[in-house]
Image (cartoon, rainbow, N blue to C red):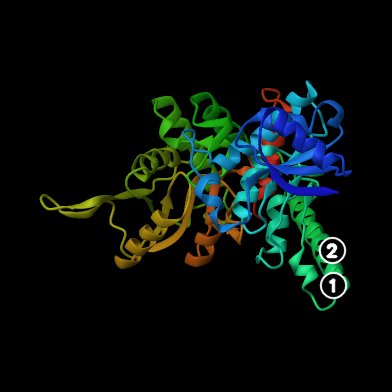
Amino acid sequence: ILLDVKRGDIGSTALAYAHACYDIHADGVTLSPLMGYDSVEPFITGKYSQKGAFLLCKTSNPGSKDLQSLELKDGQFLFERIAALATEWSRRAAETDTDTPRLGLVVGATDPIALTKVRAAAGDSIWILAPGVGAQGGDLAAACDAGFNSLGHKMLIPVSRGISRATDMTAKALELRDGINDARKLVLERRKQLQPVGEQPDLEKYQEDFISFSLKMGVLKFGSFVLKSGRTSPYFFNAGLFSTGASLRLLGKCYASSIMASKELVDAETGKPKFDVLFGPAYKGIPLGAVVCYALNEEFGIDIEFAYNRKEAKDHGEGGVLVGASMGQKRVLVLDDVITAGTAIRESHTLLKSIDAIPIGVSIALDRAEKRSLEDPLSAVQAVSRDLNIPVISIVSLPLLQIYLSSSKAYGDDVLKCVSEYRAQYGVSS
């Protein structure tokens, strides 16, 4: 029996509330966490140490965003901090680490994005109580996809009005039960597809080199990072930190190697590139184009032309926005570091088409291989490839980072677990 009483007080008053709830044989309660641990402690310690409580975290009512979605200094939302506190307070109550936390979280099924963030912040062992399916219009499948842990568990989905107001309450309850089970199966099947299993492909040497020197330069980091999208990522990639001659030389070599290994960009019979010009969009693409152009010649003996654009047209000298090789009627490969939304690549494609160039593909350093949103099954890379009808190749991808970590002695299992869970949550099928 779970009492949805939303209590929140301190001292003797909180203890009195606990007595009142548990004296009628309740197994757990819902609590407000805003007054801190001492308002929660009486419900989960002492003679009530076998009881449980759910902290209000990101509730399903429209006004929940007024406080629960406030952004903190570290970039997290308040509800994410509450999610982390559930684990912290559970351990504090038990005075040791525990696999069965005494605290869970209330997160509305009406907000799959918040559910995703909360699951990432709280971890796999925390139970989430997710009201909002039924009368409030929550999407059952989306909520399950966002809130289930990596094993497809740890969610309670209460439905009251959706059942009590149905013409046939039994049939409605069975329908919801089957819907939850079907959603669980889909989630587990998708996540299983995203896990490296069996014989894993070996990383190419240039891929291992790229990951290794990216880590050494601090370009690639593992940890906890809040992205612009609001997601909390276990890794971060900043190509701007390739800032030495040696790192740029290696960067160019890795790009060139990935390009020459691509069946889409290199003719299988002749071994020659299917492009005539490298194009580096301003600004990041300019140095990339230069080092890759050099590396193709230095490492593979291939002399390719290079061009780039300015952000603003020059009104003197040669004028215009394009610099370098002419591209009209030539096959052009576009270079970038990552594709986040695809805006820069689409703008480059439009520019190249306007001068009668022939865009044939895109080469990037890292493919994040993650969904643009919970409602969209495609990644930004997949969307660009589909919309522009061109291949997008990368030196490495999120699945390859996962493979690297699985054989690396430099990082513990906890890092691999975080990356694997992130990929299971956000990753796309190849």
Residue 380 position within the rendered picture, expressed as x and y whole percent measured from the top left: 52, 56
Is 367 placed left or right of 305 in the picture?
right
- State which mark lies toward you, 1 or 2: 1
How far, Cα to Cα, is label 1 from label 2? 12 Å
Q: Identify which residue is drawn at 46% across, 33% down.
A: 73
Provide the residue designation for mark 2: 177
Q: In this view of the protein, can residue 405 be seen by the observer?
A: no
Q: Nearer the viewer, residue 93 or 410?
A: 93
Compared to residue 397, the image places residue 100 above or below, namely above
Q: Which of 36 and 149 is in front in this view?
A: 36
Task: Indicate which disc residue 274 carries.
Answer: none
Provide the residue designation for mark 1: 169
Q: Residues within 10 Å of mark 2 (few under 14, many from 20)?
A: few
Q: Identify which residue is drawn at 87% across, 28% down.
A: 47
Which structural element holds mark 1? helix
Residue 48 position within the rendered picture, expressed as x and y whole percent measured from the top left: 84, 32
Q: How crowded is mark 1: few (under 14 residues within 10 Å), some or many (20 or more)?
A: few
Q: Nearer the viewer, residue 367 or 47?
A: 47
